[in-house]
Amino acid sequence: MLPPSTHPTEGFSVGLLLDVTSAYTDAVTTVFSSTIAFKSWFATAAVTLALVQVLTASRMWGKLQRVIPLSFPVAKRIHRWSGRLAILCTLPVFFHCVFILGFQTPNARVAIHSVVGTFIYGVFAAKMLVIRENKMVVIREKRYPHWVLPVAGGAMATMLLVLWVTSSLWFFTNVRFGI
């Protein structure tokens, strides 16, 4: 058995996390019935914005021009802002999942959710790096192949959908639908 830690900041960091978690719970439950309801609705907003991402990206890549009659600059602006808002919606969900619930595997649904959730921000970072690197490279032949960005974006949207199905959809259909 290991002796108890005598590090002076250990108690402080645990206490700080408990204070932040308590403040988060208090703030969320002033509007929503529970923190899980809050998480479900914010994840739903993120998935809805991810759908906007897929549609505007398809439009920017020359698909769905008849269905989405937007100019390229307008589609690009909507794409960027819907992505920013989608990621913003995932941040409190991320906080809830990581610091309150943690990585769990009691059944297949929760295990899938935990594993996919572990990789979501890695895929996001990879997509942002592809965009950044392609902008910085002047010689077209040295850029990533044209299919890399749509694959990264599609992976991100798919992961958000899997996370939503294994959490929010389950909550809405098995626990309750509402705020």
Image (spheres, rainbow, N blue to C red):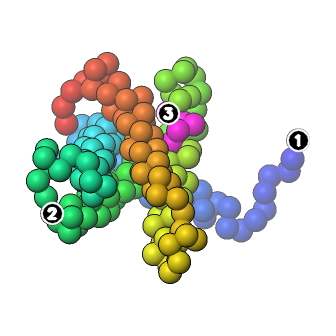
Picture quadrant where residue 84 is located: bottom left
Task: Answer whether residue 114 is magenta in the image.
Answer: yes
Query: What is the magenta segment's predominant secondary structure?
Result: helix
> Which quarter of the figure is the N terminus placed in?
top right
Residue at the far right in the pictured view = 1
Residue at the far front in the pictured view = 141
Select label 1 or label 3 by which is in front. 3
Picture quadrant where residue 172 is located: top left
Residue type at tag 3 = His
Instruction: Give the left or right position of residue 3, taking residue 73 as reference.
Output: right
Residue 28 visible here? no
Name the spot of residue 27 as percent of width and height, x first: 29, 53
Question: Residue at (50%, 72%) from the top-left corner?
Answer: 140
Find numbered disc 3 in the image and state the secondary structure of the residue it sits on: helix
Q: Which of 61 and 130 is in front in this view?
A: 61
Instruction: Give the left or right position of residue 45, taking residue 143 as reference.
Output: left
- Neighbor class of circle 1 (other Cα within 10 Å; few <14, some 14-19, many 20+) is few
Q: Give the range drawn in magenta.
A: 113-117
Q: Mark 1 points at which residue?
A: 1
Q: Name the residue under label 2.
A: 71
Instruction: Give the left or right position of residue 44, taking residue 155 as reference.
Output: left
